[in-house]
Image: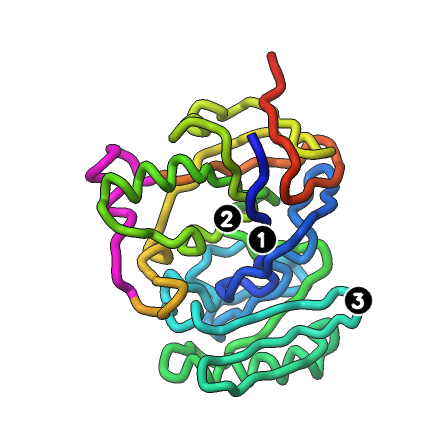
């Protein structure tokens, strides 16, 4: 098996940022993945006590399809986050500072319009990941499973609908569903697959148009009797992996 695509999502709900490589620590996520999030005013997120909250408390594609059209990229060196809207407007600011977060929150709130609840707040909490899972994980998706699904549904379903960190080739379709509890050597890191990835209405959003133009949850349920595509894995041994690196199940 081989890593074909590698992504992080610096701002929860916004576009993917393509990577060439990533260095991960045991128990951690890909650095700067879901490191920032816009919380709705009624979310009750407390940065002093950053407990996990369900995704609908934040700007996310499950509830806000137009978020798919916000291009975002974060430079860890300069600490500058750049966000650009479809109309060409945008913002560049340092989300590590309070002033920067206030400016970013104002831009995103204005973009959301009536979809914003209360007075949204943009957050960054060191070592906290605004992921969809309660624990820090890396999401792995099998390109063969996607291709099998597309062939059965008779239409393209862009891989970015599924917001994975890693897309890999070389495994048979749906083989990953049998990996729960198994360990993977992925480049120089070792990961343990912990669960399948249950899909939600965020996958309805076409990442190229920002429109809800398909229902992958219903399609998966009808075609396969489940609503999973991909798996989540925890890092058990730190290391580096990159596009083109081999992936291999570790024999029990």
Q: Residue furthest top?
A: 252
Residue at 47% in and 40% down: 141
214 drawn magenta: yes
- Measuring from the top left, give residue 215's x and y in whole percent: 25, 53
Number of numbered discs overlaid on the protein picture: 3
Circles 2, 3 touching at the beta carbon (< 8 Å): no
Quadrant the N terminus occupies: top right
Which mark is first along the chain, 3 or 1?
Answer: 1
Mark 2–mark 1 Cα distance, whole angstroms, equals 7 Å
Disc 1 crowd rating (10 Å Cα; few below 14, some 14-19, many 20+) is many
Q: Mark 2 — residue? A: 164
Q: Residue at x 58, y 34 (%)?
A: 2
Provide the residue designation for mark 1.
Answer: 7
Q: Which residues are magenta?
A: 212-227
| Residue 103 position in % (x across, y down) | 62, 84
Give the colour scheme shown: rainbow
Classify 237 as above or below 72.
Answer: above
SS under mark 1: strand
- Residue closest to the eye, 34 or 155: 155
Q: Tell me, yes or no, whether the two marked residues, 2 and 1, touch with CB atoms within 8 Å.
A: yes
Instruction: Please provide percent x and percent y for residue 48.
Output: 68, 63
**Residue neighbourhood size for the residue with mark 3, other residues' Cα within 10 Å, grouped as few (<14), some (14–19), many (≥20):** few
Q: Which residue is mark 3?
A: 77
Distance of mark 2 from mark 3, alpha carbons? 24 Å
Label 2 sits on a secondary structure element that is loop
97 in the magenta segment: no
């Amino acid at each position: 098996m081989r890593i074909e695509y590698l992504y992080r999502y610096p701002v929860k709900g916004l576009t993917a940022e393509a990577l060439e490589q990533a260095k991960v620590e045991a128990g951690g996520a890909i650095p700067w993945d879901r490191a920032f999030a816009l919380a709705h005013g009624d979310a009750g997120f407390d940065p002093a006590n950053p407990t996990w909250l369900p995704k609908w408390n934040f700007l996310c594609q499950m509830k806000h399809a137009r978020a798919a059209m916000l291009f975002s990229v974060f430079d860890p060196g300069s600490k500058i986050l750049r966000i650009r809207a479809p109309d060409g407007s945008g913002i560049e600011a340092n989300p590590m500072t309070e002033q920067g977060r206030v400016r970013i929150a104002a831009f995103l709130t204005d973009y959301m319009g009536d979809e914003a609840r209360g007075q949204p707040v943009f957050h960054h909490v060191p070592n906290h990941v605004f992921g969809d899972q309660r624990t820090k994980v890396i999401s792995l998706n099998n390109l063969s499973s996607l291709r099998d699904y597309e062939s059965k549904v008779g239409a393209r379903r862009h891989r970015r609908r599924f917001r994975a960190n890693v897309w890999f080739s070389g495994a048979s379709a749906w083989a990953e569903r049998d990996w729960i509890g198994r360990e993977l050597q992925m480049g120089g890191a070792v990961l343990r697959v912990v669960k399948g990835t249950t899909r939600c209405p965020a996958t309805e959003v076409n990442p190229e148009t920002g429109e809800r133009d398909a229902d992958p949850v219903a399609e998966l349920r009808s075609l396969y009797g489940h609503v999973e595509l991909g798996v989540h894995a925890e890092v058990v041994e730190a290391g580096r992996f990159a596009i083109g690196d081999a992936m291999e199940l570790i024999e029990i």
